[in-house]
């Protein structure tokens, strides 16, 4: 699996799922380090391979007055500090071709947002950096169509690619996860389930996305049961004050119990194979 090519993950349990987790956006150094320290402590104990997630900027906002970031270079330097402080790899999303080379100087995994996964030039630019590329399945795309997005990466000479399912649009203001897509997409690349974004309720009249964080464990358990390779989960020590996607984030205080339950479930799934 491409995960093995990230050096910081070599001492973890290969029989476990891997975890992409952190705040939606980098709001500052203190908050990033605080969240990373807690997650590293938990994942070290549970032997979960871990990648710290944080967006260095948020380009796809509902309103022009929504938080977009603290400055590109400032946020990317914080991601690098997290990596160096805790010896963990990092992932961030990119939104335009010029972001790829810039972000690749600081992080280990480049993520293509779901809204942009059909943008060929963006996907190719990420692939050509040689970094792992995490392709978020478009909310409007079938699982089968993701093979073409994966092929854009591999045809660019990079076989380090993941697919992340973040739900499919269900009407105008809800998301649903079709777990039939997990085994389909595993034919193309390792599959990650984005638990928190799958529970978004977008397009609210207020212009602020809603969510169903009460369903996080339900969706995460279903993902492990259907054989996902990784779990993506945004978390914050106080989602109510998070500057982005607080409505569907997991409170950091609840992370250890949830991951403990998922590790137990993963062992059961492994025993059935």
Image: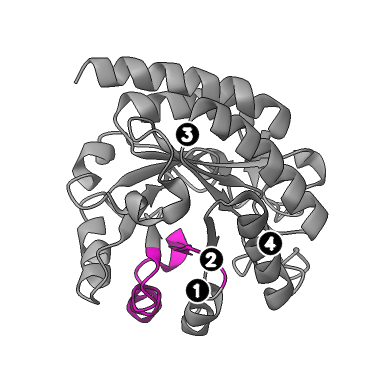
Q: Secondary structure at mark 4?
A: helix
Q: CA distance from mark 3 to mark 4?
A: 21 Å
**Disc 4/disc 1 C-alpha distance (Å):** 14 Å
**Residue 256, located in which quarter of the rendered image?**
top right
- Which tag, 4 or 1, sits closer to the chain's start? 4
Relative to 114, is 86 above or below?
A: above
In the rendered picture of this protein, how many numbered marks are placed on residues? Answer: 4
Label 3 to label 1: alpha-carbon separation: 24 Å
Q: Position of residue 104 (x, y in %)?
A: 50, 73
Q: Is residue 75 magenta?
A: no
Left or right side of 249 for 219: left
Q: Which of the marked residues, 2 or 4, is nearer the chain's N terminus?
A: 4
Q: Are marks 2 and 4 in contact (CB under 8 Å)?
A: no
Q: Looking at the picture, how far across and down is residue 71, in whole percent?
A: 74, 75
Pointer 1: what residue?
Answer: 104
Q: Residues within 10 Å of mark 2 (few under 14, many from 20)?
A: many
Q: Give residue 81's mark.
A: 4
Q: Nearer the viewer, mark 4 or mark 1?
A: 4
Which badge, 3 or 1, comes first in the chain's sequence? 3
**How far across and how far down the image is residue 223, in percent?**
38, 30
- Magenta span has 128? yes
Earlier in the chain: of badge 2 and badge 3, it is: 3
Residue that badge 2 annotates: 107
Looking at this view, is 74 or 14 the one in front?
14
Residue 234 placement: quadrant: top right
Callout 1: SS: helix
Q: CA distance from mark 2 to mark 4?
A: 10 Å
Badge 4 density bin: few <14, some 14–19, many ≥20, Cα 10 Å: some
In the depicted structure, whether residue 149 falls above or below residue 241 = below
């Amino acid at each position: 699996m491409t995960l093995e090519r990230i050096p910081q993950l070599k001492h973890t349990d290969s029989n476990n799922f891997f975890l992409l987790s952190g705040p939606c956006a980098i709001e500052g150094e203190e908050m990033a380090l605080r969240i990373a320290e807690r997650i590293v402590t938990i994942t070290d104990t549970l032997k979960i391979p871990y990648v710290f997630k944080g967006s260095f900027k948020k380009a796809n906002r509902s309103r022009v007055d929504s938080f977009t970031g603290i400055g590109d270079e400032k946020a990317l330097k914080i991601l690098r500090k997290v990596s160096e402080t805790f010896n963990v790899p990092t992932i961030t999303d990119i939104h335009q071709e010029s972001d790829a080379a810039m972000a690749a100087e600081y992080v280990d995994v480049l993520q293509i947002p779901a809204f942009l996964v059909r943008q060929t030039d963006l996907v190719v630019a990420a692939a050509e950096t040689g970094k792992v590329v995490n392709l978020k399945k478009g909310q409007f795309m079938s699982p089968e169509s993701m093979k073409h997005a994966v092929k854009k990466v591999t045809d660019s000479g990079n076989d380090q690619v993941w697919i992340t399912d973040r739900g499919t649009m269900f009407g105008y203001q809800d998301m649903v996860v079709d777990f039939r897509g997990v085994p389909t997409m595993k034919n193309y690349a390792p599959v990650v389930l984005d638990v928190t974004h799958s529970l978004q309720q977008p397009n609210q009249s207020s212009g602020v996305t809603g969510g169903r964080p009460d369903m996080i464990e339900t969706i995460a358990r279903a993902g492990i049961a259907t054989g996902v390779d990784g779990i993506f989960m945004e978390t914050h020590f106080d989602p109510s004050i998070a500057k982005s996607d607080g409505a569907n984030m997991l409170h950091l205080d609840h992370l250890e119990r949830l991951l403990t339950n998922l590790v137990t479930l993963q062992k059961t799934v492994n025993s059935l194979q």
